[in-house]
Image (cartoon, rainbow, N blue to C red):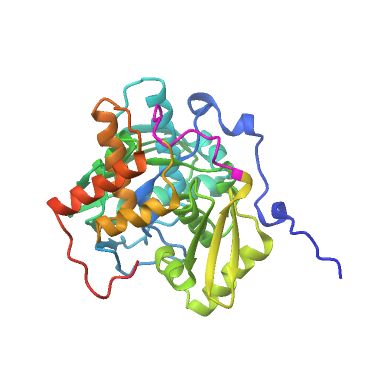
Amino acid sequence: MVTKTPNRDEQLLPAKYSEGDLFICDVADAVLKDIMPQMEHPFYSLSKKPETAIRRYEHNGNWLEIVPSVKGLATIYDKDILIYCISQLIDKMKRNEQVGPRIRINSHELLKFTNRGKAGKDYIALGEAIHRLAGTRITTNIRTAGEEQTDSFGLIDAASIRRKHGLDGRLLWVEIKLSDWVFNAVRTNDVLTLHPDYFRLSKPLERRIYELARKHCGRQSSWPISLELLLKKSGSQSPIKLFREMVKHIARHDHLPDYHLVYDEERDMVLFTNRDGKWVERPLPSDGETLPPLPDEVYEEGRAAAPGYDIHGLESEWREWWASSGKPTLNDPAAAFVGFCRSRHKRAPIKRRAADDD
């Protein structure tokens, strides 16, 4: 029996614009960027129906409470707007231009950047997305840039929309003020690069699983995770039986950008592997960074040295500390990172509860 090779492109949305048209004007050289804390924790709804219930998520000492507005929780599709803003800011930072939390967006360019249509309904959906982003409030103790924030904040603090021909007209431009929390993460380069085909993933769960793979597998050759923990990290509200079938579908068609996904039915585990060494030759997240990627086992050593801490948050702090210290030569970066974790735990140990899982 001949096994049919999966056609990845059949599972992706059509690319509406050529690459030259997609990255245009002042985002011509921008690479898709996303904030690492957002990739790690389920800030956004994966449902296409409005979610108005308060959600709370806890993992490894971090907790997150999300309060939607009456128009619903911001969705993973609404997040496209933030990715566009973040990409523009990073591009300007590369060119040593001054940046601030207030950004003016050309609606037409945003729709092209995110591989959306340009019909009237697409402009209306864009306006609704901005309202949901502005209305979603978050309370968290998740760390960004070496700081821990436990007060309530929004993803965007304010938005001004200019329309043509009244409320039924198309959006000409939007001015958005990012929250201090989001802007602080961008300013300190707490970001990762995304594949352009991210916008071609048609299902919310596919986008969310890709984000988690990008954050956790990253440059590693592989990343295993139990299906139960993947469900928890994804923020999906689906029962585990349905979630398992959706993961199997992704594994069967193998259409995630950058990573292969394999489901082990016997162990109920998911294994992500780097597709063709995709990220090996790409720049590190922080421009000008010369520290090498850390080996897989170092993260486990770091977790053991600083139990209860978000290991990726500690890595971000360590790299920032290294850069601010004049980028000294490290003969053994892995040992230096574990030492950093050990020192942090000694200064401020976190007592873990028995219910916490890794």
Task: Please state which of residues 267 and 50 is positioned toward the viewer in this rendering.
Answer: 267
Q: Position of residue 311 (x, y in %)?
A: 32, 53
Magenta part, dominant SS: loop
Task: Please state which of residues 12 and 241 is positioned toward the viewer in this rendering.
Answer: 241
Q: Is residue 288 magenta?
A: yes
Q: Residue at x 33, y 33 (%)?
A: 330
Q: Residue furthest front?
A: 331
Q: Position of residue 50 (x, y in %)?
A: 42, 65
Quarter occupied by residue 253 = bottom right
Quarter occupied by residue 142 = bottom left
The quadrant in which the C terminus is found is bottom left
Q: Residue at x 34, y 50 (%)?
A: 312
Q: Position of residue 60 (x, y in %)?
A: 28, 64
Answer left or right for 281 relative to 129: right
Answer left or right for 325 relative to 257: left
Q: What is the count of numbered marks?
A: 0
Q: Residue furthest left?
A: 347
**Image height check: is 240 above or below 96?**
below
**Image height check: is 105 above or below 312?**
above
Q: Residue 151, can we see it?
A: no
Q: Residue furthest top?
A: 96
Q: Position of residue 257 (x, y in %)?
A: 59, 49
The quadrant in which the N terminus is found is bottom right
Q: Which residues are magenta?
A: 277-291
Q: Residue 184, can we see it?
A: yes
Q: Is residue 344 magenta?
A: no
Quarter occupied by residue 300 = bottom left
Q: Residue at x 23, y 57 (%)?
A: 140
